[in-house]
């Protein structure tokens, strides 16, 4: 960074059916922009808040348009339908021209106080600053358990991810330019961005309790995102099937030798259903699991081959 050159900032917040929380969240984000400008950390005149409406079916877009008329520093981008959280983030990043971008969920459970620390790190020369949760008390037991399992699996298969990092991060336009080179349909930004390289660091923060409305990121969406993350960055699941096949074949040979021995040297052995039914069920389950994993990869190839757009913009108020 050059001395005395203050960067312009765009805070990008995806939104899906968040009419209950929009008013309060936008006020807090605008106050944050003003505070950062007063501290000479950003160029306030060229900074803004961008909300990406990811195909909301409630009154979210109407509320955004009302706030846009009242506050010029709010930018509103409406997608033609629900393309998903990752694509909504991508739409916001690719339609921003500010020096730095910070992505945050509109419910503002991520600590706004960490944003100032992120900008300070950027001013020191970091192109990527990750927001990492050090305290997830507000998350339920099951959510924390599955999150730990997910990060453990990613660690085992060798994927580059930041543990306890969601999509609360700062990135520069240099990083966004590199991200444009990735033409993937199945996006997992938490895995792609660490792969880009660039000098990076992390800021720890505590997750806040949601003040309005209910979470829109269901367990179903979380599981789908986890599967996408695992299968997008590693061939380990496919290789695991190969190893499992050899292991099952080895034990099947041992089992065959055992039953052959018993049938020859132990005349009192009574043939039962276990020796027939159990191997069938076991091998059948292995085959179904294998087909499921292979189908996941084939499905990704099918979607990538179509080269459909990640998002379609219906309206952009900037």
Image (cartoon, helix red, strand yellow):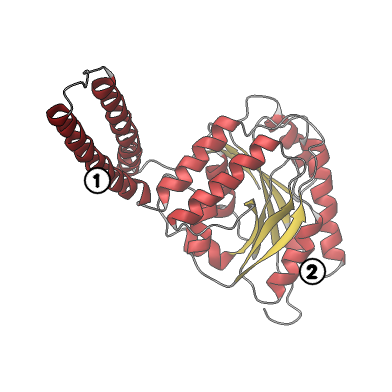
Eyeballing the image, is 179 above or below 152? Answer: below
Asked if residue 2 lies left or right of residue 263, the reply is right
Q: Earlier in the sequence, mark 1 or mark 2?
A: 2
Name the residue: 85% across, 52% down: 31
Residue 18 makes an appearance in the image:
yes
Nearer to us in this view, 303 or 250: 250
Residue 83 makes an appearance in the image:
no
Rendering coords of residue 144 (x, y %): 66, 42
Residue under label 1: 246
| Number of other residues with Cα within 10 Å of mark 2, as a class: few under 14, some 14 to 19, many 20 or more | many
Nearer to us in this view, 263 or 221: 263
Asked if residue 270 lies left or right of residue 318, the reply is left
* Nearer the camera: disc 1 or disc 2: 1
**Mark 1 in CB contact with mark 2 (< 8 angstroms):** no
Name the residue: 32% across, 46% down: 238
Question: Residue 300 lies in what quarter of the image?
Answer: top left
Give the mark count.
2
Eyeballing the image, is 84 above or below 130? Answer: above
Q: Secondary structure at mark 1?
A: helix
Nearer to us in this view, 149 or 293: 149
Rendering coords of residue 11 (x, y %): 70, 53
Residue under label 2: 41
Q: Residue furthest left?
A: 264
Q: CA distance from mark 1 to mark 2?
A: 59 Å
Q: Secondary structure at mark 2?
A: loop
Name the residue: 72% across, 62% down: 203
Rendering coords of residue 278 (x, y %): 30, 24
Q: Give the quarter of the figure containing the N terminus.
A: bottom right
| Number of other residues with Cα within 10 Å of mark 1, as a class: few under 14, some 14 to 19, many 20 or more | few
């Amino acid at each position: 960074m050059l001395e005395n050159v203050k960067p312009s900032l765009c805070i990008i917040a995806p939104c899906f059916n968040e009419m209950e929380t929009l008013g309060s969240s936008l006020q807090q984000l605008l106050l944050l922009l003003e505070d950062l400008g007063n501290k000479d950390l950003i160029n306030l005149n060229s900074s803004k808040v961008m909300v990406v409406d990811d195909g909301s079916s409630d009154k979210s877009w109407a509320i955004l348009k009302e706030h846009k008329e009242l506050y010029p520093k709010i930018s509103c981008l409406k997608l033609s339908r629900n393309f998903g959280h990752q694509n909504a983030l991508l739409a916001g990043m690719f339609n921003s021209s500010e020096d730095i971008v910070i992505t945050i969920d509109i419910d503002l459970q991520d600590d706004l106080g960490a944003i100032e620390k992120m900008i300070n790190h950027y001013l020191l020369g970091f192109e990527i600053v990750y927001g990492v949760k050090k305290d997830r008390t507000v998350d339920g037991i099951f959510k924390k358990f599955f999150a730990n399992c997910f990060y453990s699996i990613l660690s085992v298969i060798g994927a580059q991810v930041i543990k306890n990092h969601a999509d609360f991060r700062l990135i520069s336009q240099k990083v966004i330019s590199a991200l444009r080179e990735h033409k993937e349909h199945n996006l997992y930004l938490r895995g792609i961005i660490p792969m880009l390289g660039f000098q990076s660091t992390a800021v720890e923060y505590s997750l806040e309790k949601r003040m309005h409305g209910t979470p829109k990121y269901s367990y179903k969406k979380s599981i789908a995102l986890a599967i996408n993350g695992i299968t997008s960055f590693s061939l380990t699941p496919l290789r695991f099937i190969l190893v499992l096949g050899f292991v099952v074949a080895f034990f099947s040979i041992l089992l065959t030798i055992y039953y052959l021995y018993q049938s020859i040297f132990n005349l009192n052995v009574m043939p039962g259903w276990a020796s027939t039914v159990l191997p069938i069920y076991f091998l059948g389950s292995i085959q179904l699991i294998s087909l499921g994993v292979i189908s996941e990869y084939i499905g990704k190839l099918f979607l990538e081959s179509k080269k459909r757009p990640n998002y379609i913009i219906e309206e952009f108020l900037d």
